[in-house]
Image (cartoon, helix red, strand yellow):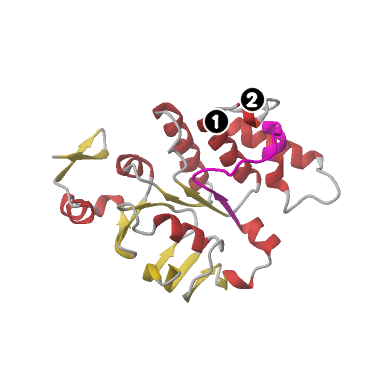
Amino acid sequence: MINARNIEFGYSAAPVLRNISCTIGRGSLVALVGPNGSGKSTLVKCIGGILKVRKGDILIDGKDTESYSPNAMARKVAYVPQSESRQAPATVFDTVLTGRKPYIGWKPSESDLHIAARALELLDMEHLAMKRTDELSGGQRQTVMIARALAQEPEILLLDEPTANLDVRHQMEVMEVLKKLSAQGITIVIAIHDINMAFRYAGVIMMLKEGRVFSCGPRETVTAVMIEELYGIKASIITVDGIQYVIVR
């Protein structure tokens, strides 16, 4: 589904991503973890075509992302940033409906309205549909952005710290939705700091360090030694009810 081949990227003269290659299969839920500045957010943006790589290429379904038209790319890939830039106030429903832009002609169809409503329902936000976005908390606005991305009906969903502004309950609710979408065949790639949340929900853990792939594989292959080397800390991994947790020592 996604194939990155020897990609490099940098801001000005400073390299951020260095010779990264990876293959992400359809329906995978991949968590990108690593220290601050390791290139997680940058890699997500490069996969989504938001940033243009300096070297190498990124293929989606065997086709270079640079060869997709903007509209075709928007039907394939949806991106949720860590924080949304301020926009003119609109209702939650109208904001989510903008996710249908790649499909809408002169005006939204009944199908477009239904899909937007369904996206809100999936995230338990339908009770806020007619509320203005500038009246919401930061966490609620972030959830609205995720609903807008779901309304695009993408094959690939890219998220940069999607749970950063949410309390624990809503973090888990969002991650449960993403896990269900992954089971339905949507490819999910998440840049995330919370390694325990990554362990709980992601099937694949990709570790980045200093702009390189430090490790990539099923979560069961991650060891305490790998975490210690990645973050420079002492750690242990315990298993409770079949779920792995990282304990910092």
Furthest-front residue in view? 12
- Which kind of residue does numbered mark 2 sit on? Leu
Q: Which residues are magenta?
A: 77-96
Q: Is residue 221 above or below residue 6?
A: above
Tell me residue 142's x, y (percent).
Answer: 54, 37
In the rendering, which numbered label is found on residue 128? 2
Furthest-top residue in view? 127
Tell me residue 195's x, y (percent).
Answer: 31, 44
Task: Tell me what residue is drawn at x 58 percent, y 40 percent.
Answer: 145
Q: Earlier in the sequence, mark 1 or mark 2?
A: 2
Q: Is residue 59 above or below residue 33?
A: below
Tell me residue 51's x, y (percent).
Answer: 53, 64
- Which kind of residue does numbered mark 1 sit on? Gln
Q: Residues within 10 Å of mark 1 (few under 14, many from 20)?
A: some
Check if mark 1's residue and mark 2's residue have beta carbons within 8 Å.
yes
111 on left or right of 129? right
Tell me residue 27's x, y (percent).
Answer: 49, 53
**In-front residue for pair 65/45:** 45
Give the spatial CA distance, label 1 vs label 2. Answer: 9 Å
**Does 172 lie within the magenta span?**
no
**Element assignment for label 1:** helix
Task: Tell me what residue is drawn at x 17 percent, y 48 percent.
Answer: 233
Q: Is residue 134 above or below residue 190?
A: above
In the rendering, which numbered label is found on residue 214? none
Q: Residues within 10 Å of mark 2 (few under 14, many from 20)?
A: some
Task: Tell me what residue is drawn at x 60 percent, y 45 percent.
Answer: 149
116 on left or right of 180? right
Furthest-right residue in view? 106
**In-front residue for pair 82/153:** 82
**In-front residue for pair 61/84:** 84
In the rendering, which numbered label is found on residue 140? 1
Dividing the picture into quarters, in which one does residue 248 lie? Answer: top left
